[in-house]
């Protein structure tokens, strides 16, 4: 990437300028130099934000797996592509070379083809963090099928919603998964999900936990025997740069999850270029992102970005607390990890345990630390810097979203200085702006506003699967000709951005996006619940936790039981990550005269901030506020 490798601040400034003055020239240069294309594009970029239309490199032909695998075989076939670190530290880790990954992806591609999967078909993947997950994702890309990975912590109901939304006829899963000292019956969850997703005719099952698998005849097939017998070569499907590569669901503030659609060409170019520069990845480095491939971070920065750069990427099956809170540092020591990328919630959970779990471990291989998923608080930042980075590793606080495909705002190690709690400066080609409440662009610094991006970057999502209107309405209709992120941000006098959090009804809990309305819908299904409102409140480890205000139809039988039933409902319908930390029953919820629940007030109460409730006299029922404060759970 020579000329466009960012290695000094001056270079960043000049490349940034080029990328803004001539985005098409800039990105076509990056695309031409660094990837193998079967044929070139006609136009670099076509776009119209008001209709949410963005096309990069349209007409160009490629296959992303040839860029992630085939082209590395000539000189790097024996290089480790993926280090698989199992949940149990006593089980051996597995190093998968580029040659072996290529062959296993080809075998999986052949199995999928054999099962009738064709270009454009959707394939639902519900697997734990085992090699077959990476292999299946890449196999879909190889044959042009659109993968839809569903995080294996989601419930049966969440899974069936996603399968039905994209009409996936095939699901790849495992008998179960390991998480710390627990095992989870994934196949059982799939069986339940499929009761509501009749469209599925094939389930391929990987054996992971050696349980007795209940195979449903005519539908379920064990995967490993099929793989063993499959050919180790499969020709890559020729894809247009604008063909969909995958769908990944993200929570909306209302309604069902949004299937964000990413395309082949722009996504490849942007994730690869950001990976290399933001982590300052150098040949032979060992890179580890602790995310799950069920989230965008895993798609872009465990798989596609690193593999396009011929990197060695670690894939960890387990959790940070098993067998004890030193597991991350054991892995760093064991594999001599150079770049380590995790979420603030994990840092806070580990910091709480003190430093004894780090003592005596050699983590001196670390060079760059990263965080993603939510704002990092000052205390956690300094703990990370001091105890893990030993004051020597730059921290990149990377801000981005499922919708953006890749990192949009971040410092660059040794080049753009980190500033605690700030994501800092826009990445190359990214044009962030803050908007005020009157829809004007704020030109001053030292202000807070709503964060928008005013020009497309190559990996912006192209649509919401099956609902382009929703895509336009959600992201492009709040401000004219802008992509609206849903986040608020502060900009300092040097142009550094600090993300202040969501400005809509999405709450980020332990780095996971949760829409409040879908959770409320589930609670309201309880036969004794009349109404509910969920808000976030600050939580020491999770960043935010969920607080539910619930009114019952029959308040004479308030009991702990109902709280448990509510959380069980949420766990069954969405997943354990959406469970409420606190539930307060109340006679009434504060409402405006037009009947809208005043969440702003509930948010303050949940945060114990009773002084700044604002004017409540205009409410329909101001007395409800007083009653809620009196019964508020400290
Ligand atoms: C939040 C994760 C502050 C933000 C890649 C965004 C962050 C949402 C950061 C997207 C960060 C992500 N600092 N907030 N570094 N990174 N966020 O789609 O609110 O799971 O809109 O993508 O997470 O979450 P998603």
Image (cartoon, rainbow, N blue to C red):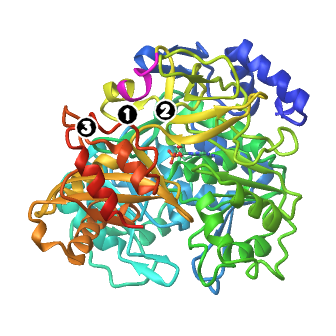
CA–CA distance in space, label 3 to label 1: 37 Å
CA–CA distance in space, label 3 to label 2: 40 Å
Q: Residues within 10 Å of mark 1 (few under 14, many from 20)?
A: many
Above or below — where is 601 with respect to 552? above
Going from the N terminus, do you reach mark 3 or mark 1 first?
1
Report the residue at 49% width, 37% height from top: 403
Q: Which residue is mark 2?
A: 461
- Image: magenta residue range: 473-479
Q: Which type of secondary structure does the marked residue at label 2 adopt?
A: loop
- Marks 3/1 in contact by CB < 8 Å: the verdict is no
Please state if 214 lies on the left or on the right of 14 as rendered.
Answer: left
Horizontal and vertical percent position of residue 577: 41, 63
Quadrant assignment, res 560? bottom left
- Marks 2/1 in contact by CB < 8 Å: the verdict is yes
Q: Is residue 510 magenta?
A: no
Report the residue at 80% width, 49% height from top: 281
Residue 464's tag is 1
Closest to the observer, 272 or 433: 433
Q: Which residue is mark 3?
A: 619
Ligand 1 is found in which quarter of the picture? Answer: top right
């Amino acid at each position: 990437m020579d000329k466009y490798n960012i290695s000094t601040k001056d270079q960043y400034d000049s490349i940034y300028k080029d990328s803004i003055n001539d985005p098409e020239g800039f990105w076509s240069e990056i695309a031409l130099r660094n990837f193998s294309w079967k044929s070139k594009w006609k136009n670099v970029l076509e776009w119209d934000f008001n209709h949410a239309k963005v096309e990069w490199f349209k007409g160009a032909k490629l296959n992303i797996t040839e860029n992630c695998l085939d082209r590395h075989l000539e000189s790097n076939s024996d290089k480790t592509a993926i280090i698989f670190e199992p949940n149990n530290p006593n089980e051996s880790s597995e190093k998968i070379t580029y040659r072996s990954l290529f062959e296993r992806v080809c075998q999986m591609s052949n199995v999928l083809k054999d099962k009738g999967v064709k270009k454009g078909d959707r394939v639902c993947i519900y697997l734990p963090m085992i090699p077959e997950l990476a292999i299946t994702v890449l196999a879909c890309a190889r044959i042009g099928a659109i993968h839809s990975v569903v995080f294996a912590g989601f419930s049966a109901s969440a899974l069936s919603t996603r399968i039905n939304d994209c009409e996936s006829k095939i699901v790849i899963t495992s008998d179960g998964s390991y998480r710390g000292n627990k095992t989870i019956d994934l196949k059982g969850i799939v069986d339940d999900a499929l009761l509501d997703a009749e469209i599925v005719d094939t389930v391929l099952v990987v054996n992971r936990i050696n349980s007795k698998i209940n195979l449903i005849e005519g539908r379920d097939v064990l995967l490993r025997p099929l793989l063993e017998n499959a050919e180790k070569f499969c020709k890559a499907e020729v894809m247009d740069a604008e063909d969909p590569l995958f769908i990944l669901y993200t929570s909306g503030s209302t309604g069902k999850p949004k299937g964000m659609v990413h395309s082949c060409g722009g996504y490849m170019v942007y994730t690869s270029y950001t990976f290399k520069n933001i982590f300052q990845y150098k040949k032979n480095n060992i890179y580890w992102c602790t995310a799950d491939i069920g989230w965008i971070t895993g798609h872009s920065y465990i798989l596609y970005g690193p593999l396009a750069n011929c990197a060695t990427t670690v894939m960890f099956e387990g959790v940070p607390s098993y067998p004890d809170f030193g597991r991350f540092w054991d892995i760093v020591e064991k594999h001599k990890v150079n770049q380590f990328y995790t979420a603030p919630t994990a840092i806070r959970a580990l910091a709480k345990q003190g430093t004894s779990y780090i003592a005596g471990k050699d983590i001196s291989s670390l060079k760059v630390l990263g965080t993603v998923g939510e704002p990092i608080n000052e205390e956690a930042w300094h703990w990370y810097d001091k105890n893990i980075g030993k004051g020597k590793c730059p921290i990149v606080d990377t801000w981005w979203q499922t919708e953006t495909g890749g990192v949009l705002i971040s410092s660059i190690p040794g080049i753009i200085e980190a500033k605690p709690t700030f994501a800092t400066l826009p990445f190359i080609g990214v044009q962030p702006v803050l908007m005020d409440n009157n829809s004007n662009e704020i030109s001053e610094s030292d202000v807070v506003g709503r964060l928008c991006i005013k020009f497309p970057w190559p990996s912006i999502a192209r649509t919401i699967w099956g609902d382009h209107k929703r895509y336009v309405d959600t992201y492009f209709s709040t401000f004219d000709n802008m992509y609206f992120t849903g986040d608020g941000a502060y900009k300092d006098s040097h142009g550094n951005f600090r993300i202040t959090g969501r400005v809509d009804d999405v709450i980020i809990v332990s780095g996971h996006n949760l829409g409040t309305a879908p959770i409320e819908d589930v609670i309201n299904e309880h036969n004794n619940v009349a109404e509910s409102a969920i808000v976030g409140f600050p939580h020491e480890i999770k960043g935010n936790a969920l607080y539910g205000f619930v009114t019952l139809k029959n308040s004479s039988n308030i009991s702990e039981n109902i709280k448990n039933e509510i959380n069980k409902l949420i766990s069954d319908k969405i997943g354990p990550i959406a469970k409420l930390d606190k539930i307060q029953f109340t006679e009434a919820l504060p409402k405006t005269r037009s009947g809208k629940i005043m969440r702003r007030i509930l948010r303050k109460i949940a945060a114990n901030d009773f002084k700044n409730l604002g004017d409540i006299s205009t409410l329909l029922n101001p007395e409800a506020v007083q009653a809620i404060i009196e019964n508020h759970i400290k």
